[in-house]
Structure formats: C-alpha cells, structure tokens
Amino acid sequence: MAEYVWVDATGGTRSKSRTLEGDKEYKPEDLPVWNFDGSSTDQAPGDNSDVYLRPCAVYPDPFRGSPNIIVLSECWNADGTPNKYNYRHECAKVMEANAEHEPWFGLEQEYTLLDHDDRPFGWPRGGFPAPQGPYYCGVGSGKVVMRDIVEAHYKACLYAGVKISGTNAEVLFGQWEYQVGPCEGISMGDQLWISRFFLSRVAEDFGVKVSWHPKPMAGDWNGAGLHSNFSTKEMRVEGGMKHIEEAMKKLEPHHVECIKEYGEDNALRLTGRHETGSIEHFTWGVANRGTSIRIPRETAAKGYGYFEDRRPASNADPYRITKILMTSIFGKL
C-alpha cells in the first residue's frame, strides 16, 4: 500500500491510497504519477479538475508497517505547470542553485490540540484554566494533556526516518512543540510536511483536532510559531559570526517580504508580547526572545553557529520559509 500525501490549497494535508505490485524499495522516480480531483480541494476548476501527483519523497509507513510506504507528492496541472499551491517546486530550484552554501534548517513546530468544540483540549467548558506558568515543559495531570498523541507522533516520525530531534509541552495549556532538523536544503520542507501529516493522522485516532493557528485563543495566552533555525557552512565554522551579522543586514530590508511568506493571521501573534517581536519592525539580538531574530548566547560566545528566525507562524509553509531565507541572504535566481 502506498499512501500519496499532498499539500492542499489551505495549507493542510490530503492523502489517498493505492496498491503497488511487489515489495521492492521504491524511490520517487520508480513510482507512478497519479491524480486527484482538484475541484474538491480548491486547487483546480471543475471544468478542468485533474491535478497530477508527482512523487518527490518516500518514507516507510509507520501506521501500516513494512513494506508499505508514504509518498510525498508535488501537485502539477494538466498543462505541465506547477499548481499555484505547489511551493516546493520553486524552493527546490533555489536550494539547488545555492547548494554550495550547505544550508541547514531546524524548524520548531508549535501546535494546539483542540476538542471538537474548537477549544484547547482539557480546558474547562465555559471557563478557562489557571494562568500560564506551570504548563511549559510541564509534567502531571492538570499541567499537560494528550501526551499519548505526542509520544505516538514522536515514534511515527522516528520509524519513518523523519529527523525529529525532540518535543516538549508549550506555554499555553493544551499546546505542544516538536522540532525537526537539522535538515539540508529541500529535505527540510519535505520532512516538516510529512511530520504534520503524521500528527494529524495520529490525532485522528484519538478524536482530537490539531490546530496550526498562530493565535488559537485570544487574550493573555501565548501564540504558536514555527521558529526557524538556520545556518550555512560559512556560519558554522570559526569566524562564522561575521557571516551571521551580514545575514542580519541582508534580511532587514526584506522584512515585509518575509512576513508575507510567514503564515496567515500572524499579526495576531507578532505583537511584541508573549515572547515575540513586533510585526512592524525587524530586530535582532543575542538571547533575546522579544526580537525578530535571536542569536543564541552559545553562538555569540563561540563566534560561530546559527540564528533563529522567530517570525514564522505555526501555519507557515516550510518551503516558503526556507526559500525566502535563502533568497533574502543570497539573492534570487
């Protein structure tokens, strides 16, 4: 069984299954191009609705076990052009053009688990939990909920070869985070999208919804981001701090352009409060979580390492994030 997975028009994942003959180890180029009804996903008009699925990455299936596979696919139109919601195609070209810089990415995916009333799972009906404080990295009943989902998702990613590097409970009650990376080039977007599919699929078994919204609850509650850690081979060696500082100078004039690529409803989150910088201004600093970009204290102390772009929202497309970082720093194709 091969589960073909793709990204739809709203930034969610869709999938459908097909049977393949044999149990060999498939590579993307070995797999058949498939199609789906794009008019049912807002990816094509009804009078020309076929959208084609071109396999681009293959993973072992953690739900069905070996030899079954998960097939991440790009969406293409019948005329041979990338679908308008296919952000992977252009991102891959940028990564290939700048491969000599060996870009590494590590994305920190925050998300909120919701009940079917669209309130965070575990929140009292008609009321609110205690103020934020005990929930971040919390342990124990009343501090965290649905750890079963988190553990099952973690193991699913490991089984499939996704480079999930950790997980923790977050500041908002009912909110969690996991990290994927470091991944080089286009593999960052591929692995983050597949990890999102896995999380939605695991939560489905528990009857729980996953929210990627950057501000799931209005008021004095933390939002959800997709903090993006980035480095090049020049930044990772002695003297790399110079290249990091140069990157800050190149990113600043592209702040508005970056924000446009960093997710929907992000203005609700980037207020300058709750560990965010203001959406209106580009700022950076060492160990400062109230800036657009944070340089870890360890990086500043050693003089080389990586930086963390804290602006992307939790619902941002990783292909768009990684592409705009590369084009802002190294120029467009």
Image: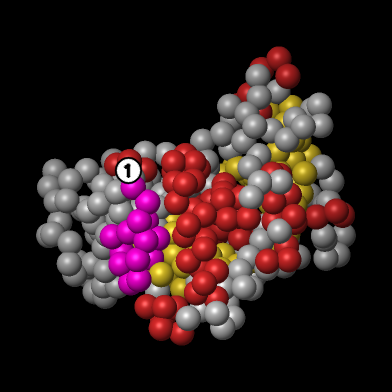
Quarter of the figure with the N terminus: bottom right
Residue at image x 73%, y 49%? 93
Q: Is residue 39 visible?
A: yes
Is 288 magenta? The answer is yes
Q: Main secondary structure of the magenta part?
A: loop
Left or right: residue 150 versus residue 155 is left
Is the residue marked by circle 1 packed among few (<14), some (14-19), or many (20+) residues within 10 Å?
Answer: few
Q: Is residue 210 visible?
A: no
Residue at image x 30%, y 55%? 276
* Residue 155, horizontal then vertical, whole percent: 53, 71
Left or right: residue 10 versus residue 1 is left
Placement of 46 over or under 125, stated as above or below = above
Q: Nearer the viewer, residue 34 or 63?
A: 34
Is 124 magenta? The answer is no
Q: Where is mark 1, residue-wise?
A: 280
Residue at image x 78%, y 39%? 34
* Residue 201, horizontal then vertical, whole percent: 52, 53
Q: Nearer the viewer, residue 298 or 15?
A: 298
Q: Tell which residue pokes out farthest to the top in this image.
A: 47
Residue at image x 25%, y 51%? 272
Q: Amino acid at mark 1?
A: Glu
